[in-house]
């Protein structure tokens, strides 16, 4: 079927911080994120509601304030004529990127005696053990809310690109941190599998697609450590890969 109106919901892994062109600086939203590329490929309109830092709550019911800009709950912006809705969210609920960044900065600070105490404090926090059932439930609530607003929409969940390769320890993490963060990522993406099964939504497993493209690999689809909001987030190649997979899936079904 032809798709005429694409709507994108989600957090930074959908918004694309750091990928030019920037279309909304406060939201960290790129004009070349996967939703824009998919809409271009379909020749469809796009309503991009993604906001970096979003949680399932700010997608469902809670306004999100960034600097001087307040973004209303994303679901409220889904129009009735939407026929394709994409969703990447839940990682911020579970502290995924926050944990990655905390440990990355801890290791950097511990390299110098004058910042080592700060690094030690940052490193003390554990890698969280995730209650993914809550995120599964919240992702399901978002899917239900979207279907309530746009009954004819096809909803596609898109999980998180692989950050950490199974065989390469990424800078600046040690082996133990690397193993723990890989396990954390698997649990986050496992929530998408369960939510797709529970709701009947489609699922693009970006995590599987990008298994050989983590930080430190010859062709990474995510950025490594850097002093910007784009650290450990999808790069242009990663967004292109997700978009291509989504377009292939839509064409086949």
Image: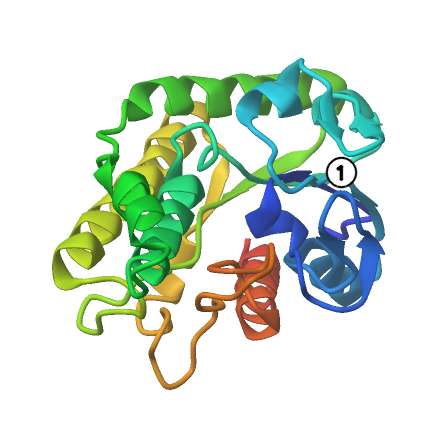
Q: x%, y% of residue 195?
A: 40, 29
Residue 167's quadrant in the figure?
bottom left
Q: Which element is circle 1 on?
A: loop
At a point 40% along the width and 24% down the height, the residue shown is: 135
Residue occupying the far front of the picture = 114
Label 1 Cα neighbours within 10 Å, binned few <14 / some 14-19 / many ≥20 = many
Q: x%, y% of residue 130?
A: 27, 28
Q: Nearer the viewer, residue 59 or 199?
A: 59
Q: How is the image coloured?
A: rainbow
Q: Nearer the viewer, residue 112 or 213?
A: 112
At a point 37% along the width and 73% down the height, the residue shown is: 213
Using residue 115 as the reference point, say whether residue 52 is left or right of it.
right
Using residue 70 as the reference point, say whether residue 204 is left or right of it.
left
Q: Nearer the viewer, residue 251 or 97?
A: 97
Using residue 101 as the reference point, say whether residue 52 is left or right of it.
right
In the image, residue 236 sits, relative to residue 33, either above or below, namely below
| Residue behind mark 1 | 49
In the image, residue 186 sits, relative to residue 18, either above or below, namely above
Q: x%, y% of residue 21?
A: 81, 67
In the image, residue 227 sits, relative to residue 135, either above or below, namely below
């Amino acid at each position: 079927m032809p798709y005429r109106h694409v709507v994108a919901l989600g957090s930074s892994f959908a918004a694309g911080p750091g990928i030019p062109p920037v279309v909304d600086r406060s939201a960290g939203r790129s004009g070349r994120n996967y939703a824009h590329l998919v809409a271009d490929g379909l020749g469809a309109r796009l309503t991009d509601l993604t906001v970096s830092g979003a949680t399932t709550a700010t997608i469902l019911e809670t306004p999100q304030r960034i600097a001087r800009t307040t973004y209303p709950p994303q679901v409220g912006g889904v129009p009735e004529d939407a026929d394709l809705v994409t969703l990447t969210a839940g990682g911020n609920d579970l502290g995924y990127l926050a944990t990655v960044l905390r440990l990355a900065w801890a290791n950097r600070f511990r390299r110098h005696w004058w910042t080592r105490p700060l690094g030690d404090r940052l490193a003390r926090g554990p890698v969280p053990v995730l209650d993914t059932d809550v995120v599964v439930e919240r992702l399901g609530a978002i899917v239900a809310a979207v279907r309530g607003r746009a009954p004819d929409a096809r909803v596609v969940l898109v999980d998180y690109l692989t950050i950490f390769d199974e065989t390469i320890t990424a800078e600046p993490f040690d082996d133990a941190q690397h193993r723990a963060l890989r396990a954390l990522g698997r649990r986050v993406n496992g929530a998408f599998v369960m939510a797709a099964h529970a709701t009947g939504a489609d699922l693009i497993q970006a995590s599987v697609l990008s298994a050989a493209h983590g930080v430190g690999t010859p062709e990474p689809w995510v950025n490594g450590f850097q002093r910007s909001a784009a650290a450990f987030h999808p790069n242009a190649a990663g967004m292109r890969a997700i978009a291509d997979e989504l377009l292939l899936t839509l064409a086949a079904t």
